[in-house]
C-alpha cells in the first residue's frame, strides 16, 4: 500500500527515531547519491515558500533525482479539474508529490486517489516535515528526549499541531501558552496528553507564557498570523502582544535554553531581533535540518 505523510497523527516513535538516525547519517556524509536516480518529485504549492521548496529540490538533487514545481493556480485542483483526476494523472509521471495547500481536505482527497506518496509541505492545519526537522534538531542536541521540556508560546497553528503530535509520542514534556481562543483544539490536547503520558512525558496547555517557559530546555514560537489568516492580523496582534518571545520572557526559562522558530519570522512581533539573532537561537539549524530529514523521508517513502 502506498504510504503518505499528511500529518503526524499516526507517526510512531519508532518510525520517527528511525528517520532521525537516517537523517543523522545523511547529514554526516552529504555526498551525492543515486538512490532516487531517474525519479521525479512534483511540488504543487498554493502559498509562498523558501525553505520547503528549496530543501525538497536540493534533497532530490542530492539523492540523484529531480523535481518539477507547479503553482497550484496552474493545476487548479478541484477547479480546473477534479482532484481525483489530478491525482491519477500526476501518479503516472511522478514518484511522489509534495503539496502546500490551504486545505487539508484537498490534500487528503489527493492522497486518496494518488498511487504515489503524497507529502504535506504545509496545510492550514499541519506541517509534519517542519515538526520532524525540529524534533530531529532537539534529538541531535540532547541525544534523546527523556526529561526534555519543549515550550511553545503563541498561536495554536499548523506548526504547533504537528509538534504536539510528534513530541507527545516521543515522550517530551510539552508546555504550551496561547491567548484565550487561540490554543490547540481540545481533541488534540486530549490525544497528545494521552500519548505523552504513555511515552513518559507530559503535556500542559495554558495561557501564561512565563509559566510555560519556566522548565524549558527549548522555547518555540511561530508567527501570530499564518498564511491564509491575513484578514485577522490586527486582532491577532492585539491578542498576542503579551506572548512575544523577548529577552524578558527568555530570562524566565532555564539558563541553557535554546530558542526555536520555523521561519519566516516577523521580528518585533512574535520574537525580537535580539532573541532570534542571539546566542540561544538555533533557527538556522532547524532550517538546515529540513534538508536532512526530508531526505530521510524521501528515502523511506519513495525508494
Ligand atoms: N518553515 C517553512 O516551511 O518555511 P517556508 O514557508 O519558507 O517553506
Ligand atoms: N504557521 C506558518 C508557518 C509557515 C512556515 C504559516 O502557516 O504561515
Image: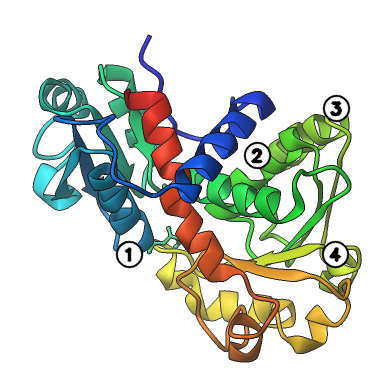
Residue in the image at 9% along x and 49% along y:
74
Q: Which mark is residue 158?
A: none
The residue singled out by tag 1 in the image is 50
Determine if residue 203 is in view: yes
Question: Along the horizontal axis of the image, is 206 left or right of 101?
Answer: right
Question: Along the horizontal axis of the image, is 174 left or right of 58?
Answer: right
> Which quadrant, please, contains the C terminus?
top left
Question: Along the horizontal axis of the image, is 231 left or right of 256?
Answer: left
Which callout, 4 or 3, points at the residue further toward the start of the chain? 3
Which callout, 2 or 3, points at the residue further toward the start of the chain? 2
Residue in the image at 57% along x and 48% along y:
131
The residue singled out by tag 2 in the image is 166
Residue in the image at 33% along x and 30% along y:
118
Q: Number of numbered discs present?
A: 4
Residue in the image at 85% along x and 64% along y:
212
The residue singled out by tag 3 in the image is 198
Residue 266 position, x and y percent, is 50, 80
The residue singled out by tag 4 in the image is 212
Check mark 3 vs ligand 2: CB closer than 8 Å? yes or no: no
Residue 259 position, x and y percent, is 68, 71
Determine if residue 223 is in view: no
Number of the front mark, 4 or 3: 3
Q: CA distance from mark 4 to mark 2?
A: 19 Å
Amino acid at each position: 500500500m502506498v504510504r503518505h505523510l499528511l500529518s503526524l497523527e499516526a507517526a510512531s516513535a519508532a518510525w520517527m527515531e528511525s528517520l532521525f538516525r537516517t537523517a543523522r547519517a545523511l547529514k554526516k556524509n552529504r555526498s551525492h547519491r543515486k538512490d532516487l536516480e531517474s525519479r521525479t518529485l512534483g511540488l504543487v504549492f498554493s502559498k509562498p515558500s523558501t525553505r520547503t521548496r528549496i530543501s525538497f529540490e536540493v534533497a532530490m538533487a542530492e539523492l540523484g533525482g529531480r523535481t518539477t514545481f507547479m503553482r497550484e493556480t496552474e493545476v487548479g485542483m478541484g477547479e480546473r479539474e477534479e482532484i481525483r483526476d489530478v491525482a491519477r494523472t500526476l501518479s503516472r509521471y511522478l514518484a511522489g508529490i509534495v503539496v502546500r495547500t490551504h486545505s487539508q481536505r484537498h490534500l487528503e482527497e489527493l492522497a486518496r486517489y494518488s498511487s504515489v506518496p503524497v507529502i504535506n509541505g504545509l496545510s492550514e492545519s499541519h506541517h509534519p516535515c517542519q515538526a520532524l526537522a525540529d524534533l530531529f534538531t532537539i534529538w541531535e542536541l540532547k541525544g534523546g528526549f527523556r526529561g526534555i521540556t519543549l515550550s511553545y508560546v503563541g498561536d495554536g497553528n499548523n506548526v504547533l499541531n504537528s509538534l504536539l503530535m510528534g513530541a507527545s509520542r516521543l515522550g517530551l514534556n510539552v508546555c504550551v501558552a496561547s491567548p484565550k481562543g487561540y490554543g490547540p483544539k481540545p481533541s488534540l490536547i486530549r490525544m497528545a496528553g494521552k500519548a505523552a503520558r504513555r511515552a513518559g512525558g507530559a503535556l500542559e496547555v495554558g495561557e501564561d507564557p512565563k509559566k510555560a517557559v519556566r522548565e524549558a530546555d527549548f522555547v518555540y514560537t511561530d508567527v501570530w498570523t499564518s498564511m491564509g489568516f491575513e484578514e485577522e492580523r490586527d486582532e491577532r496582534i492585539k491578542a498576542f502582544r503579551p506572548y512575544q518571545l523577548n529577552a524578558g520572557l527568555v530570562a524566565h526559562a532555564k539558563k541553557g535554553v535554546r530558542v526555536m522558530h520555523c521561519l519566516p519570522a516577523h521580528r518585533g512581533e512574535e520574537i525580537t531581533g535580539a532573541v532570534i539573532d542571539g546566542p540561544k537561537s538555533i533557527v538556522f539549524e532547524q532550517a538546515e535540518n529540513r534538508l536532512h530529514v526530508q531526505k530521510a523521508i524521501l528515502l523511506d517513502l519513495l525508494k
